[in-house]
Amino acid sequence: MEEELAVDCIMVREGCSVSMVQGRNLDEHETSCRFRKVPCICCQISLPLDSLLEHIKNAHDGEEETWHEHDFVGGSYVNVNGYDQWDPTWFSHFGVIFYSMIRKEGEIWYFWISAECGQEEADRFTVEIVIANRKGDIKTEYTCHPVTVDHTMEQMKIEGNCLVMTTGQVRRMAARNGDEVEDLLNMMYYVEVEDSTVVDC
């Protein structure tokens, strides 16, 4: 019987050392390879996934969130009088790097979580996104899956893996801050996984 030859991952020139018999397993690896090219979630420049976090830190002043007990990740402040796009904060959990993302298009606000892993791994996670005023007495929340970092905005909108608010809702919520700063909201998120094994991305 003729021995099947191992084939290198298509990202071998980017630094991937994986080699296996061509077929489904190799195809699955290449769709989630740490060295595959992805667009930056902020500026859309193409770069290897393995370099994304350093790029976010250096080019976009991305800040790390401190992981708390259980499944809670401390949230970010959202300036409602700010920009159409915010630089992400990031956190690591279960061996995966996540980014909290915000975009404003016209009068519509989108809040979601991106993950540095393949789609199969991302679907194992559930995230609860909570937007609240500073007093914490008014909030809206949505439970969904994180999206992969190479998801486009259009894909995310179609799949519905984001919390959506209008500018009117955002401003009304911020106006109820009382004595607190009137133009800030809290974005908080909770992450759960189907099991506690480390995800291999």
Image (cartoon, grey):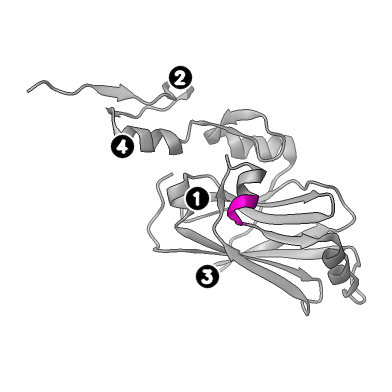
Tell me which residue sits at (45%, 19%) in the image.
13
Task: Give the mark nearest the N terminus, 2 or 4.
Answer: 2
What is the magenta range? 157-161
Q: Where in the figure is residue 177, as x and y percent of width and height?
A: 87, 74
User: Spatial distance from mark 2 to mark 1, Cα to Cα?
Assistant: 24 Å
Q: What is the three-letter code of the residue carrying label 4? A: Asn
Cα gap from disc 2 to disc 3, whole angstroms: 40 Å
- Kindly identify which residue carries mark 1: 96
Identify the residue shown where x is 80% and y is 65%. 185
Q: Which mark sits nearer the N-terminus, 2 or 3?
A: 2
Relative depth, front residue between 198 and 130: 130
Q: Which amino acid does label 1 sit on?
A: Val
| Three-letter amino acid code at the position of disc 3 | His
Helix, strand or loop for disc 4: helix
Residue 33 lies left or right of residue 191; in this view the side is left
Residue 129: image quadrant is bottom right
**Mark 4 surroundings: few (<14), some (14-19) or many (≥20) residues within 10 A:** few
Instruction: Give the residue pinned by disc 2.
Output: 13
**Residue 77 shown left or right of residue 127 in the figure:** right
